[in-house]
């Protein structure tokens, strides 16, 4: 598999345990930043009633497309190119938007674009589910996260572990309400916001 992610392989089962309650009544998942497609393939097999729409930046699209073609899971749609800052996301609306380990890779302007796009794309009553590390009150949840943040910023100064409060403010600005903040293995969080019904 191209661009295989060991961390993605490790976090699938813990995320699955949360998804079992969260996705029971869902129909269409839009995944932002699908990477290798490991999550799309793993979760789509376990939730056959869902359609799963993988997306990636153009630079990573080819590898994702090849990986999904090799596996050919029926309820995984063909991947689409998605830049979160394009003026309008050229994707169908979804009742779940999911992204894992992306907000600390994006620059802050891209994080802002992400929430704007989610606000426009997510159906009323839908859920935004974000997995990854966060800071709270400016503090890291572990020493290893502090080290990881330093490594991220050395690699790319615009990246870094985001403050929960700042991210939650972006979510609230597009009309989303925090539903859950679940501590996950390896000092990660699973954050769930809901878009109110009209």
Image: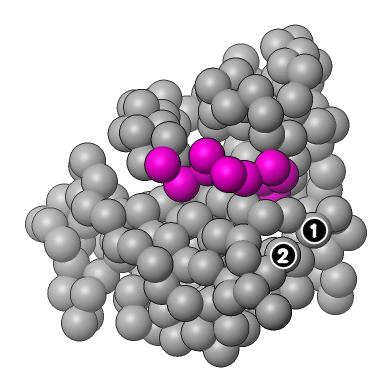
- The answer to whether residue 62 is above or below residue 128 is above
- Which residue is tagged 1? 93
Determine which of the numbered discs, if any, sits on residue 66 in the image: none
> Is residue 155 shown left or right of residue 57?
left
Which one is earlier in the sequence, the residue at label 2 or at label 1?
1
Query: Magenta region: which residues?
Result: 21-31
> Pointer 1: residues within 10 angstroms few (<14), some, or many (20+)?
some
- The answer to which image quadrant residue 179 occupies is bottom left
Circles 2 and 1, Cβ within 8 Å, touching? The answer is: yes
Quarter of the image for residue 72 reads: top right
Say if the magenta span includes residue 29: yes
Callout 2: SS: strand
Camera-side residue of 19 and 140: 19
Q: Nearer the viewer, residue 57 or 156?
A: 57
Residue at x 47% of width, y 29% of height:
5
Q: Is residue 181 visible?
A: yes
Question: Looking at the image, which residue sits at the far left?
Answer: 143
């Amino acid at each position: 598999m191209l661009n295989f992610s060991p961390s993605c392989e490790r976090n699938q089962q813990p995320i699955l345990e949360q998804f079992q309650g969260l996705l029971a009544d869902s129909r269409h998942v839009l995944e932002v930043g699908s990477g290798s497609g490991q999550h799309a393939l793993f979760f789509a097999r376990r939730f056959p009633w869902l359609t799963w729409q993988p997306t990636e930046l153009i630079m990573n699209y080819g590898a994702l497309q090849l990986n999904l073609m090799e596996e050919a899971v029926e309820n995984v749609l063909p991947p689409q190119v998605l830049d979160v800052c394009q003026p309008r996301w050229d994707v169908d609306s979804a009742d779940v938007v999911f992204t894992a380990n992306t907000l600390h890779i994006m620059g802050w302007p891209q994080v802002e674009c992400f929430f704007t796009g989610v606000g426009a794309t997510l159906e009323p009553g839908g859920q935004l589910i974000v997995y990854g590390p966060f800071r709270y009150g400016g503090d890291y949840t572990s020493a290893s996260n502090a080290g990881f943040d330093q490594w991220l910023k050395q690699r790319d100064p615009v990246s870094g572990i985001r403050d929960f409060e700042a991210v939650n403010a972006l979510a609230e600005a597009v009309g989303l309400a925090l539903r859950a903040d679940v501590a996950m293995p390896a000092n990660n969080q699973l954050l769930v916001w809901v878009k109110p019904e009209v």
